Amino acid sequence: MNTTNRAPKRLRIISIAGTLLLTSFLAACTVKDQASLASGPQVRMGVSDFIDKKVDVPVGQSIQVVDTVNSPHTVINGTWDGSTQKPGSEPGAPKANLNFTGEGQSQTIGPFKTTGDFKFYCTIHQGMNLDIAVK
Ligand SMILES: [Cu+2]
């Protein structure tokens, strides 16, 4: 009688302990993801150009693109080659199609999941190129 009572109790304790372990493990993962997202580098834009034109990004992180003045920008994958727009994205590049209308606006590109060089540009301002080096 004693043995039949003890066995289910032990099982219950083991399953509770397992649930607690799993819960704390998942909580730790969630916190880590939020931390890496929040700490992504910032890319500032001025009146008609990027203020930060070449930015290094650790693999797995995103960038925060910030409009620092009251100027519109449309940022997509590709580059200006002289006065010609060359849209297009490198293999593994996160897609960007960001529209900014004024000061203080901030949007995210990423996460950058592979190392390499990735180019973005503003379709409104000729020569407004951004080079992202993911390391
Ligand atoms: Cu622009």
Image: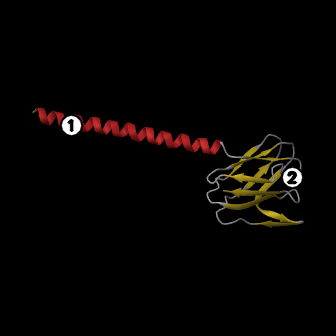
Asked if disc 2 is less than 8 Å from ligand 1, the answer is yes
Choose between 98 and 42: the one closer to the eye: 42
Instruction: Return the residue at label 1.
Output: 8
Q: Where, by quadrant of the figure, is residue 122 drawn?
A: bottom right
Q: In the rendered view, does 120 fall on the left or right side of 13? A: right
Q: Quadrant of the N terminus?
A: top left
Question: Residue 52, image x and y in percent?
Answer: 81, 50
Instruction: Return the residue at label 2.
Output: 49
Q: In the rendered view, does 115 fall on the left or right side of 2? A: right
Choose between 28 and 97: the one closer to the eye: 28
Q: Where, by quadrant of the figure, is residue 91 drawn?
A: bottom right
Q: Residue at 57%, 44% (x, y): give it.
A: 33
Q: Which mark is residue 75?
A: none
Q: CA distance from mark 1 to mark 2?
A: 68 Å
Q: Dot 1: what SS?
A: helix
Q: Dot 2: what SS?
A: loop
Q: Residue at 69%, 52% (x, y): give it.
A: 57
Q: Residue at 72%, 53% (x, y): give it.
A: 56
